[in-house]
Amino acid sequence: MSDEEHHFESKADAGASKTYPQQAGTIRKNGYIVIKGRPCKVVEVSTSKTGKHGHAKCHFVGIDIFTAKKLEDIVPSSHNCDVPHVNRTDYQLIDISEDGFVSLLTENGNTKDDLRLPTDENLLSQIKDGFGEGKDLVVSVMSAMGEEQICALKDIGPK
């Protein structure tokens, strides 16, 4: 055998896909779908009947889960659509920096410092006010397709 040691440069993640395929006809309201490269929550689905020659078509209306923009797409119901892997994780808020980043405590005791404050004015003021009053706050972070954003807030009482 060889006495050489092999060193591998690790430059990527595990290679897990950011999306998975699902038949368009099986995607329902409140599910998720990728429209124009953006992860969306489906708010409306309508199916048109087949014509003389052709497929039934599904008309999806979705709201981008990060920007809240409305997007639409029409796909033949027998075709596959990309569905994003959407995860929601709760973290305890430790600190808010002056440059708009938050410091969060993960479940294993590490800190996560790469998230910005949300752009939603209502949520932003709730987080700042609650933090200013010294409350223990838990934020829900939604992640999909390599993006993360704070999407909700829970108050677990005073510190």
Image: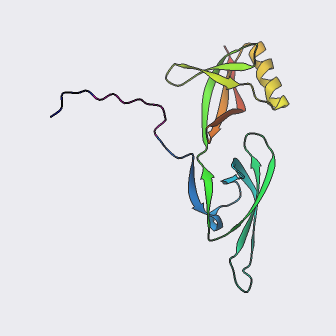
Q: Which residues are magenta?
A: 6-14
Residue drawn at 81 percent across, 50 percent down? 70
Residue pushed farthest right?
121
| Quadrant including the N terminus | top left
Give the image location of residue 98, x and y in percent: 76, 13
Q: Is residue 12 left or right of residue 66?
A: left
Q: Main secondary structure of the magenta part?
A: loop
Q: Is residue 99 left or right of residue 91?
A: right
Depth check: 138 or 88 in front? 88
Location of residue 7 (image quadrant): top left
Vertical order, 73 against 114 (above or below) = below
Q: Is residue 15 left or right of residue 28?
A: left
Give the image location of residue 20, x and y in percent: 55, 53
Vertical order, 149 against 129 (above or below) = below
Is residue 40 one of those drawn in magenta? no
Residue drawn at 74 percent across, 78 percent down? 49
Depth check: 79 or 118 in front? 79
Location of residue 43 (image quadrant): bottom right
Q: Please, which colouring scheme is shown?
A: rainbow
